[in-house]
Image (cartoon, rainbow, N blue to C red):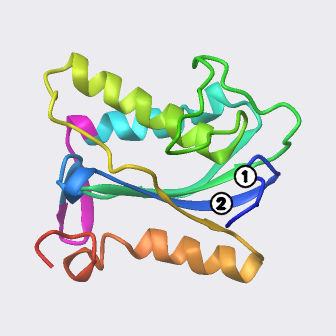
Amino acid sequence: MKDFDYSESGEYFVTICTKNKKSWFGTVRDSFMVLNDVGKIVNKCWQEIPLHFPNVELDDYVIMPNHIHGIISIVDNQSVGAENFLPLRCNRYQKIIPRSLGCIIKGFKIGVTKWCRTNNREKFHWQRSYYEHIVRNKKDLERIRKYILDNPYYWFCDQNNPNF
């Protein structure tokens, strides 16, 4: 949302996709996601977000073959920080505000990408940017949680599925 401060306390629903929606993280079998080694690293890096950003809490999430959906809560905007990441510089294409949702997502992407580069997955790339939605109320939150939990069941008719 234009002019919104994404470092503010609140809940954010995000979707982060791989470049060209290539399936890097595993497969869906019988409506359940089966993670491969890259998918397990995505899971590990996602769960470690609060270690790098102490005032961030994670809600429901799901890793799919070529994307991840998750709810990130910034609990206190005063002290969210990238403890183990270098400060991000702004460039002409995007503006990353320290302690913001963009900073959190960038750190997550860096962690996964670093692992891929050092483990012979040099062709791995994320799609530029990510999708976000500001969670507005409890009803919105419950709808998003259901969407996340049902995602593997609906994979075969999902717009992110390259075989759809």
The residue singled out by tag 1 in the image is: 6
For marks 2 and 1, give the CA distance.
9 Å
The relative height of residue 20 versus residue 163 in the rendered view (above or below) is above
Magenta stretch holds residue 29:
yes
Residue 8 location in percent, x, y? 81, 51
Q: Residues within 10 Å of mark 1 (few under 14, many from 20)?
A: many
| Image quadrant where one finds the C terminus | bottom left
In the current view of this chain or complex, which residue is farthest to the front?
92
Q: Which residues are magenta?
A: 28-38
Q: Which mark is residue 12?
A: 2
Which structural element holds mark 2? strand
Q: Are marks 2 and 1 in contact (CB under 8 Å)?
A: yes
Q: Residue at x 38, y 49 (%)?
A: 128
Residue 104 location in percent, x, y? 60, 39
Determine whether, in the image, residue 39 is placed left or right of residue 82.
Answer: left
Determine whether, in the image, residue 95 is placed left or right of residue 118.
Answer: right
Question: Which quadrant holds residue 132?
Answer: bottom right
Question: Which quadrant holds residue 91?
Answer: top right
The relative height of residue 18 versus residue 40 in the rendered view (above or below) is below
| Residue in the foreground of this view, choosing between 142 and 114 | 114
Q: Which mark is residue 102?
A: none
The relative height of residue 158 versus residue 33 in the rendered view (above or below) is below
Question: Which quadrant holds residue 163?
Answer: bottom left
The relative height of residue 8 versus residue 103 in the rendered view (above or below) is below
Determine whether, in the image, residue 38 is placed left or right of residue 128.
Answer: left
Q: Amino acid at mark 1?
A: Tyr
In the current view of this chain or complex, which residue is farthest to the right?
78
Q: Residue at x 15, y 34 (%)?
A: 123
| Image quadrant where one finds the N terminus | bottom right
Which structural element holds mark 1? loop
